[in-house]
Image (cartoon, rainbow, N blue to C red):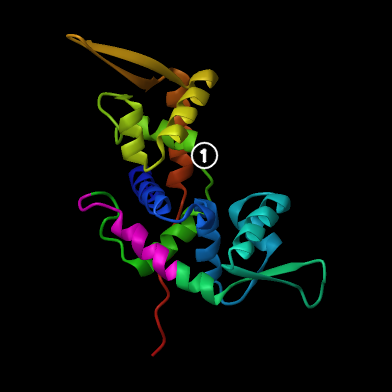
Amino acid sequence: MNVREYLSVRRAFGLARQEMPASERITFEELGILCHLALAPEGLRTSEIAEYQGVLRPTMTHRTSHLATLGLIERSSGQDDRRSICCTLSGHGADELGRIVPLVCDKISSGMPMSRCTPQRMRYVLDAMGRLSLSSSDLVLLGVWTGMCGREGTSTVGELVDGLGLLQPTVSMAVSSREHAGDVVRTRTRSGKLVSAGVRLSDQGEAHATRLDEHVSAVRVARPRRSKE
């Protein structure tokens, strides 16, 4: 998967998420868990899902507990080890996945990377992307670095909001965080009486974005299984 495809799907999910009731919103990582469970032949232990996403068990316990609270998955004690928690996609979770995944596809505008991806294929894409956890500040770096959210290596906060599908406060906080870390530099461009503010990557930010690109490029999407006749 290349970084433009990754950002296109993340943007689509961000836009789709904004249409969800606040009390029912899930994170991108949680959507990956739902897709992973849907593609698994049977339920998975919390430890297996934690390994899938490369996180510690307490983090995965928090994520699966949230999904269970929403009724999207069912959690039960393992038959052999009562301390082991097994997670399965619930009927409600399957219905919600059947609604969210096509919505993500619909939010990818014609001509953008992945715009021709079918919902069936998108489940495998989201499953693969769920293995890589990138923060909103990581997305900001990649958005500026690729030029998908601005021109000539500079992006405004508004362009990042539109290009990444994130809310304005989220982007502003991410830019401030990256500025404090030395990854981005704020810029000001004057045209007559108008002054536009933007951000560009520092040399350190360029190096960081390059490493993120390498992680994204390592994402491999499985082929959909052929249905048995």
Magenta span: 97-111
- Disc 1 element: loop
Q: Main secondary structure of the magenta part?
A: helix
Answer with left or right where residue 124 lies relative to residue 36.
left
Q: Which residue is mark 1?
A: 135
Residue 103, given in percent of the width and then of the height, sits at 35, 61
Q: Is residue 221 visible?
A: no
Q: Amino acid at mark 1?
A: Ser
Q: Is residue 79 above or below residue 19?
A: below
Rendered image quadrant of residue 20: bottom left
For the point 53% across and 55% down, the residue is 23
77 or 67, nearer to the observer: 67
Q: Is residue 175 above or below residue 38?
A: above
How crowded is the residue under tag 1: few (<14 C-alpha within 10 Å), some, or many (20+)? few
Q: Is residue 109 above or below residue 175?
A: below
For the point 60% across and 68% down, the residue is 73
Rendered image quadrant of residue 67: bottom right
